[in-house]
Amino acid sequence: MDDRIRYDVIGTPTAKNYNFITAVKTTGIFCLPSCTARKPNYENVEFFSTTKQAIRSGYRSCLICNPISHASYSDGMRNALKQINKNPTLNISELIDSYKITLKELDNWFITHHKLSLDIYLQATRTLKDFKKLRSNNIDEVVTTVFYNSNDKKEDCTLNMISTHLGKMYVAVDDSGVVLCEFIDRSKIYNQFKYLTSNRNYNFKIGKHVLINQVKRQLNEYFNGERKQFSVPLSLNGSTFQNKVWNKLRELPYGYTTSYKDQSIRLGDIKAIRAIASANGQNMIAILIPCHRIIGSDGSLTGYAGGLDRKKWLINHEKSNCGMAYQGTLSLK
């Protein structure tokens, strides 16, 4: 369906019969086409096929039409989803007790209808909400966000959001290099910001920085198949062991995949497979530190905090751009 036709459908009596998502650029909100909110101008609208696409593009769920709960469900599920949409920071344990549903039922709901786990949805939504507060420059709101640290020894860190072929990403830099580069719906993204503020004493501020521009340019070149190595400096904030693992990952050639076992051999400790896998999972600088190049010994994708669909795309993208045919299954195990 053409975008102009989608736009004309918004707010009409037949809009409830259409399955697409309307996102409003000026408010950062995504809605159902049947939403009763004031119809935005055409130039301010973006359309998606799924809620997952809208979230990955940096939009939050509308409070009026509540698009995260668009399918049929029990009263308990409907009320729980309404509360989650209104306040993504609420206590989930208390919520499920109140509405007589289980955590598994709630998680399955998100996976079935939105292709996102409950945890990923909550963390992405919380972070987007705090990002909006930080951008507002209202100090009373900023001090309540995950981006603010009241420690006197705090260090400023410039943060912004960039668009990529696989969705929007947060990029944060200090004066020495890239601190964080992550998809906005990355698993545990909220916890990463908490770690950087609490353990590394960063204070985040929205702004422009030459290093953010450099990341954006080099990622665009990477996604266009024009870049195979990144030259932007990094500022690693892991433990000594984590930094060692991450630096070793940076040595993996473009288009090359290896297993956790081979990675542990390269690091000189075959018994450290679990610890190395954990360090890979804690990587805060996606793509620039290519943890997506680590796969299972049987060729399966195993895990990736940015989503297995993205991992598969990244591997295939690199293979195709260096003329290599991948021999493994790349299955979503």
Image: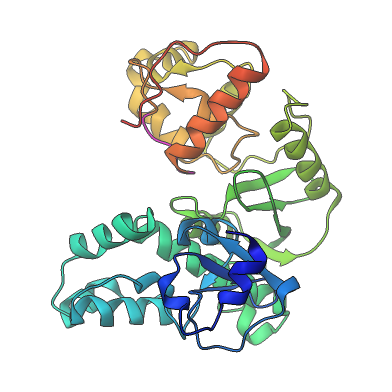
Instruction: Point out the image quarter for the N terminus.
Output: bottom right
Vertical arrangement, residue 291 with respect to residue 44, above or below: above
Q: Residue 164 appears at what percent x and percent y?
A: 67, 46
Which residue sits at x=46%, y=38%? Answer: 309
Vertical arrangement, residue 101 with respect to residue 307, above or below: below
Q: Residue 317 appears at what percent x and percent y?
A: 60, 26
Left or right: 244, with 116 as reference point = right
Q: Residue 172 appears at what percent x and percent y?
A: 69, 53
Residue 216 drawn in magenta: no
Q: Residue furthest left?
A: 100
Which one is in front, 160 or 140?
A: 160
Which residue sits at x=55%, y=24%? Answer: 316
Left or right: 78, with 182 as reference point = left
Q: Which residues are magenta?
A: 302-306
Which quadrant of the view contains residue 73? bottom left
Main SS category, magenta section: loop
